Amino acid sequence: MSDKFSLILKYFPILTEKQKLLFDQMFDLYQTWNEKINVISRKDMDNFYERHVLHALGIAKVIHFKAHTRVIDVGTGGGFPGIPLAIFFPEVKFHLIDSIAKKIKVVEDVILKLGLENISCQQIRSENLKNKYDFIVSRAVADIGTFYQQTKHLINSQGNNDLPNGFLMLKGGDLASEFANVKQYFKFYELKNFYEEEFFATKKIAYLKQDK
């Protein structure tokens, strides 16, 4: 296992050997792709496990998805937060979508090489998707008002997790103005309460309950 990977074990020490191997393998896969296209900023590759994998797994600090939960990652980019979450929750079904073909090509390849069987991916805009999911996850893809209108039709009204079905979004900075006009129940989880690295000082997970 790489020294960089040890950061994951610092906060998630109880992983199976298979999960450890998969997380460890992620770095080389993204490094290889980054030599072809700039799927992750080259500067961020030096902090891959902190700024991408650990950041994505912040959602696992807020909720432990139950088996057979259906999660969609909207605007997944290079596969975040979806791929790390799929490794962490092998009994949960993940669907990763993005409108940009080259990003989905990367995601497809990473899924294939890691042998992940609980993920599917698709090049599509969320507005054109008809399936239903328990949770939408995302990483800073759009203003909440726009994002909610584009994706609210994707969420099932009934669920069986500890949090009611809804949105779990990785965001940063002061969110007060962005959420000022939101009518549904929402809550911010500060990632600095889970991680001690400076990168997470202003990072949050915004949970938004789906309106029935």
Image (tube, rainbow, N blue to C red):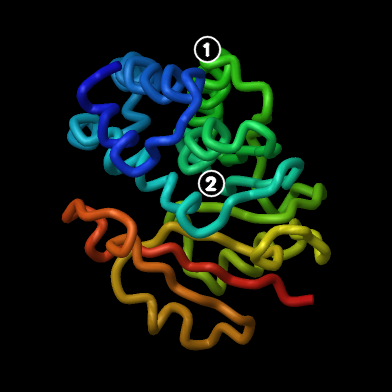
Q: Point out residue 142 in the picture as x, y percentages from the top left corner.
A: 48, 61
Q: In which quarter of the image is the N terminus?
A: top left
Q: Which amino acid, mark 2?
A: Gly
Please tell me which residue lies in front, 189 or 168.
189
Say left or right for 6 vs 143: left
Q: Residue visible at 65% across and 46% down? A: 72
In the picture, the disc for residue 113 is 1
Q: Point out residue 112 in the picture as x, y percentages from the top left corner.
A: 58, 15
Q: Which amino acid, mark 1?
A: Lys
* Label 2 residue SS: loop
Answer few, some or many: residues within 10 Å of disc 1's Cα (few below 14, many 20 plus, some between 14 and 19): few
- Write down the residue under mark 2: 75
Q: Residue visible at 62% across and 86% down? A: 183
In the picture, the disc for residue 99 is none
Q: Which of marks 2 and 1 is nearer the N terminus?
A: 2
82 w.r.t. 175: above or below: above
* Label 1 residue SS: helix
116 w.r.t. 178: above or below: above
Number of numbered discs overlaid on the protein picture? 2
Say left or right for 78 vs 196: right
Q: Point out residue 101 in the picture as x, y percentages from the top left corner.
A: 55, 30
Q: Point out residue 174 in the picture as x, y percentages from the top left corner.
A: 31, 76
Q: Residue visible at 51% across and 18% down? A: 18
Say left or right for 161 vs 110: right
Q: Quadrant of the C terminus?
A: bottom right
87 w.r.t. 64: above or below: above
Q: Residue visible at 42% across and 52% down? A: 58
Alpha carbons under labels 2 and 1: distance apart: 21 Å
**The image quarter in which residue 194 lies:** bottom left
Depth check, mark 2 against mark 1: the one in front is 1
Circle 2/circle 1 CB separation < 8 Å: no
